Image (cartoon, rainbow, N blue to C red):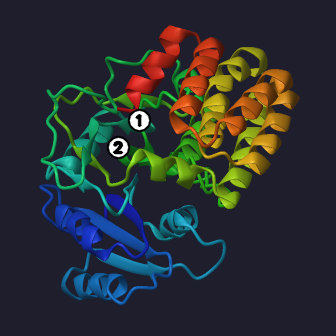
Amino acid sequence: MPILSVIIPCYNNGNLLKEMIDCCIQQTFDDWELIIVDDQSTDNFTQKLVKDYVAKENRIKFLIRNRLPKGSVTCRNIGLYSSLGKYIIHFDADDLISNTCFENRVKFMEEHPDVEYASFPARAFWEKSKLPSYDDNGQIWGDHCKYGKDLLASFLRADYPFSTWNNIYRKASIEKIEWDEQVKIYTDFSFILPCIFAGLQHAFSELKELDYYYRMAYNSNNMCASFVSDEKCESTLYLFDKIILELHKHSLGKKYIKIFREFVLLHYERLIYENNKQHIDEFISFCDKHYKMHKRLKFMSFLSLMFKKNRKLQKGITYCFFSILFGYTRYIKIILSRV
């Protein structure tokens, strides 16, 4: 029985998945199983690629999603149910890892038996650019120096200290924490918050080298559009309502709901940039329910839609509005964190 189970959902991205599989095979630690769960790919390459690897490498399992709903979170649950390892890692199919990733993560957990999940340093890289180093400028996820002990506050203001892919989990600690299959956006966020609410013991590894490389392969316009499709807008309202209910349930209401307002408004900002009137109105109703901001947000949406044909003017108005809501210094910090 392997000590480590690595779960990767995939869909029509065989070329990039191949790079991740090769990274796993080249690890310095070899007591692992790799569970690849295909979300019913429609190309003629991805499933064949994985089957070819399975024929050569007996540590690789290949599963195909056999139930609804479609999506990576369903695939992750399917992978988790079939896993045999003491420890669990969730990767994305299009990213890369260092060849000591498995070794460092398992070693840390073995040396810290009280820790239930731990985070390791990761950086983003742009497709076709060279891989970054630990000492480069810019954000490092899983950097213990940047964040205090209040992980919940960091996540609720959309200032992620880590994600699921640069973590390792004790399987026994997360067996009752499933991925919510109704969530289509902010999926990592939706899995990590229940870990925090459950009081799982977390640690930063304090490793001084990168072990995960998150691939960036899109532009900012496409990114905004991907956040505001009908399906994802419905999912966002569902998730945000669920989070606020959980905060009340754990008697964390007033302080943390106020902190969460920042995350909520950043999603509203994306709706504004996409001029999505239907979902803007739905989101204003949500904000008014929890934050009593109906008049301010309604006025902002009116101005934005009025100037939607002049993108520069629209962005200028939006910038001024959110600078007032967040405070100028905080909003500048948010903008810079996206660069």
Residue 118 in the image, given as x and y percentages of width and height: 38, 36
Q: Is 36 or 280 nearer to us in this picture?
A: 280
Q: Amino acid at mark 2?
A: Asn
**Is any atom of residue 149 visible in this view?**
no
* Residue on which the image places disc 1: 162
Q: Check disc 2 and report its element: helix, strand or loop.
A: helix
Query: Where, by quadrant of the figure, is residue 317 drawn?
Result: top right
Q: Are marks 2 and 1 in contact (CB under 8 Å)?
A: yes
Q: Amino acid at mark 1?
A: Phe
Q: Is residue 23 left or right of residue 329?
A: left
* Residue on which the image places disc 2: 166
The residue at 74%/33% (across/down) is 301
Residue 184 in the image, given as x and y percentages of width and height: 61, 57
Query: Where, by quadrant of the figure, is residue 242 drawn?
Result: top right
The residue at 35%/72% (across/down) is 13
Q: Is 268 or 140 nearer to us in this picture?
A: 268
Residue 103 in the image, given as x and y percentages of width and height: 19, 48
Q: Check disc 1 and report its element: helix, strand or loop.
A: loop
